[in-house]
Amino acid sequence: MTTTDPRMPSPDDCVIRHILEKHARDIPDAPFAVFTDGNQWTYADTLAKVRQTAAGLQALGVKQGDHVFCWLPTGADCLRVWFAINYLGAVYVPANLAYKGGLLEHVVQLSDAKIGVVHADLAPRLKDVELHWLTDLVILEGAPPDDPRLAFHTAEVLEPDQQPTDLERPIEPWDIAYVIFTSGTTGPSKGVLTSYTQIWTQNVESLPFITGDDRFMMTLPLFHVGGTGPVYAMLSNGASVAVVESFSTENFWQTIDETQSTYCVLLGVMTPFLLAQPPSDQDRLHTLKQALMVPWADDAKQFAERFDIKLYTLFNMTEISTPIVSEPNPPQLGIAGTLREGFDARIVDDNDCEVPIGTVGELILRSDRTWAMNSGYYKNPEATVEAWRNGWFHTGDAFRMDDEGNYYFVDRIKDAIRRRGENISSFEVEAEVQMHPAIQEAAAVAVKSEVSEDEVMVCVSLAPDQTLDPVELLEFLQPRMAHFMIPRYVRVMDDLPKTPTSKVQKHLLKAEGVTPDTWDREAAGIKIKREKIGGH
């Protein structure tokens, strides 16, 4: 089916299958992916690897429209599996590598996937959860675990000596490309249905300064919109990506030069960490030309001048399409940018009534392009209706706008915590903490970090005749929660503050912050780090 609506991107411009085939035909020898071990994929190489992987998935039973669960660290395997899933017209459903326990089970259930591709180091965690529809796993980089509920397949099944068969129908711009999980606020994490039109609007149209000569250094994971989006932008532009294990302050500039990267994303603590390094004559002798800094920090001007690069900032969420983008090196502190063409924005009060310029309220959005923002939350119509009430998408974020049309992020209205680039659902933290037998009630809140963004504090009241050792609580939580969700601070209280209707008054706990009776695991010398997966 075709459309004459000029606002819609064509399938050749936005559908991953068509983009890959176009570039493999027109620029076959141009690099698409370079790796720190010296390997490189041209566009012709990339299409060949994707088609082979797609044939393997197809032989396992993956059909157009199916959801495929992907649990892999960032790298060559994750890239080819993601693209292969979409090449078949199927839906890529990645999971955070830190998930375990109840949150992992929730994501597996919501994925609706029968087939998954999983790293061997992660697969044993599935033994502790219900599998729901999951029946087959392809295990990469190791041996499968002992789990009689699953049929296991080795990596060789994704390297068949055959080509994928034709699709039942063309892949359209409004088809769903992937489901990315975003933090829940008053409930479990939600799966955001993301169309090809949304990915294109979010990552290509919004960044016109990206050209085919650019190379993006990817340090963010491919289960996160901050990782998938820029990779898609490079693919769409016929540009390239440098696949890097993770952000490293010590090796950042060396890796930029070794990979010849021209573009990157700087989140949270990355900027102050890099600025804290001693100044050097080499500070301006690098290939990096431009970067996104989110949020726009007070030290942005210093960073741009010291390292001689153009810095941009923007406002985006998994659910939307980068509606607010700045000019390079904007002078205003705390700015998010200005509204770009094709979007409407309002700043409203609790009743969706617009507030005066300069007044803080919730940012709500809509687009004049169909399918340009999320297609809803998968299998969660209540949350979809709530977010899209009155025909506008409610971001849950507090903004203000000045007389010149500049938008400024103020705070989070929704009950979520942002730590080291991860959105954390307070609901999910509380659910796991309250599983501890000594705890009667728990409230998780954000408190300010000394470095950047938030730290997690959990305030608890105890069951009758119980005591709590915070160290023992951490030991209880570690096998149940992602490392970044585990609280830094634990405060034991006789009772949590309540409203007359018995709702916990979290704003009071946040206002009090870290009190003298709050236990701090870092002060106790306890550090919790992410688990390494396959050496990553």
Image (tube, rainbow, N blue to C red):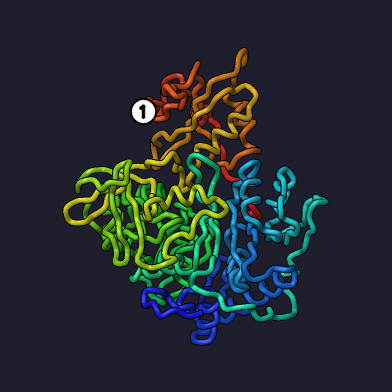
Q: Nearer the viewer, residue 531 or 486?
A: 486
Residue 363 at what x, y percent from top left? 32, 50
311 vs 515: above or below:
below
Read off the residue under disc 1: 511
Q: Residue at x 53, y 71 (%)?
A: 33
**Would you say 192 lies left or right of 338 here?**
right
Direction left: furthest residue: 403
- Number of residue marks: 1
Residue 161 at what x, y percent from top left? 75, 79
Residue 394 at what x, y percent from top left? 38, 50
Q: Nearer the viewer, residue 238 or 506?
A: 506
Q: Residue at x 61, y 50 (%)?
A: 107
Direction top: furthest residue: 465
Residue 260 visible: no
**Would you say 391 lies left or right of 406 here?**
right
Residue 366 visible: yes
Q: Residue at x 40, y 69 (%)?
A: 204
88 vs 410: above or below:
below
Residue 535 at what x, y percent from top left? 64, 54
Q: Residues within 10 Å of mark 1 (few under 14, many from 20)?
A: few
